[in-house]
Image (cartoon, grey):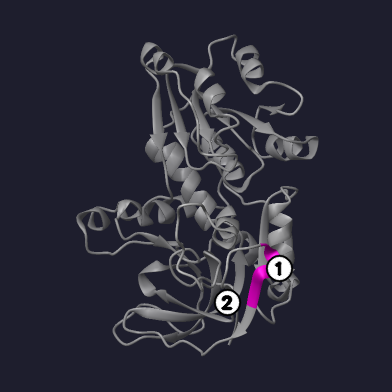
């Protein structure tokens, strides 16, 4: 089978197309014919490398995967060949107390497709049957594959970690990013008033179209000043933070008393400084968040098409994977970048389901 591999860290041009043996599913596993993969910043980090972190190279990238089952490993199963499925992107050991309690994202052996084991940028992929789920009804396969990682991340941040309540105010940093788009919609679903930041008028319009009440163009206006004005100096109850060094300290300062900052990433740097007086005088909470539990994915994806909807930017063919990486890396994407499987026409996965 054909597969893209990351064999050494570098740019999009360093993605390597290989012919590899067709893998066979073991007990409890399924092999799927990959029809679509959605890109995430995780793909860029694995390709470029992260200082101080070792990835298991060579590796096939791609954690958000959709396809049809072509083979099932030995053992009883509710799945059948030919079914169209999505893949839950994160995998715990399945045996430790955290996994058994539904908190598999905290398992010490937790990994993600395309980061710790081979992902979906190949003709076929092997996945545990426990990590198969049916796509939401009534949307295209491209929209469905755009959901798992970003929706799970946003749901865990807002529902589980921040415990957002109706009537609260939420600021979403980078509101037109993959996680930002889902965070705006989840916050609105929970009954919150949502503000967002964006880097261009195009991105601001996108954020407004999916539920942000006001969008701050951070290249023109200091977002902290804008939030104080929008909230009559009270501040917001929750900040959804994925930017890092460029925004973190000011994100803390715009929180109301008792506010919660939830951070899931650091696209602009991870080294930050914090004034502890701000934390204890205002009773603030800083909450870390990575992915979410397997049950949270099932719960959150049930709302897709019923208050939640992914936004697509462009769809590429799998042969164009380096170009798709360039598109995501350019920060010009308005929504998710999706790649159709080898030999699959992009139009075939963007057509809405009946």
Task: Return the disc, 1 or 2, that comes first in the chain's sequence.
Answer: 1
In this view, the mark in front (1 or 2): 1
Residue 159 versus residue 291 in the image, above or below: above
Residue denoted by label 2: 34
Residue denoted by label 1: 13
> Residue 223: x, y in percent?
65, 22
How far apart are labels 1 and 2 at the CA level?
A: 22 Å
Q: Is residue 195 magenta?
A: no
Closest to the observer, 90 or 14: 14
Residue 60 sits in quarter: bottom right
Secondary structure under badge 2? strand
Closest to the observer, 181 or 319: 319
> Would residue 243 be found to the left or right of residue 105 on screen?
right
Residue at image position (23%, 58%) is: 100
Residue 279 sits in quarter: top left
Secondary structure under badge 1? helix
Residue extent of the magenta highlight: 11-16
| Outermost residue to the left | 97
Closest to the observer, 184 or 166: 184
Closest to the observer, 135 or 280: 280
Residue 22 versus residue 150 in the image, above or below: below
> Residue 91: x, y in percent?
37, 63
Characterize the local packing of mark 1: few (<14), some (14-19) or many (20 or more) Cα atoms within 10 angstroms.
few
């Amino acid at each position: 089978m054909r597969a893209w591999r990351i064999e050494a860290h570098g740019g999009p041009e360093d993605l390597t197309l290989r012919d590899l043996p067709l893998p066979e599913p073991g007990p409890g596993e399924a092999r799927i014919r990959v029809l679509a993969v959605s890109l995430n910043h995780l793909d860029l980090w694995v390709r470029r490398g992260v200082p101080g972190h070792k990835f298991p190279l060579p590796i096939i990238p791609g954690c958000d995967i959709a396809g049809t089952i072509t083979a099932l490993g030995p053992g009883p199963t509710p799945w059948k060949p030919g079914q169209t499925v999505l893949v839950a992107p994160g995998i715990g050991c399945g045996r430790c107390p955290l996994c058994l309690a539904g908190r598999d994202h905290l398992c010490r052996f937790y990994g993600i497709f395309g980061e710790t084991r081979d992902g979906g940028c190949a003709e076929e992929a092997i996945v545990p049957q426990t990590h198969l789920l049916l796509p939401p009804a009534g949307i295209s396969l491209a929209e469905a594959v755009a959901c798992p990682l970003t929706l799970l991340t946003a749901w865990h941040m807002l529902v589980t970690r921040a415990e957002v309540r109706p009537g609260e105010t939420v600021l979403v940093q980078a509101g037109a990013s993959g996680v930002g788009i889902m965070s705006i919609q989840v916050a609105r679903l929970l009954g919150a008033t949502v503000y967002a930041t964006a880097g261009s008028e195009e991105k601001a319009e996108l954020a407004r179209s999916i539920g942000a009440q006001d969008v701050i163009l951070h290249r023109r206006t200091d977002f902290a000043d804008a939030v104080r004005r929008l909230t009559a100096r009270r501040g917001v109850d929750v900040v959804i933070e994925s930017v890092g060094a460029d925004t973190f300290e000011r994100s803390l300062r715009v929180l109301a008393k008792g506010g919660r900052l939830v951070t899931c990433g650091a696209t602009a740097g991870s080294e930050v400084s914090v004034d502890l007086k701000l934390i204890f005088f205002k009773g603030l909470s800083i909450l870390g968040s990575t992915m979410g539990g397997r049950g949270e994915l099932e719960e959150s994806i049930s709302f897709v098409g019923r208050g939640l909807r992914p936004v697509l930017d462009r769809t590429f063919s799998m042969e164009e994977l380096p170009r798709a990486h360039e598109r995501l890396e350019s920060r010009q994407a308005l929504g998710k970048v999706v790649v159709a499987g080898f030999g699959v026409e992009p139009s075939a996965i963007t057509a809405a389901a009946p």
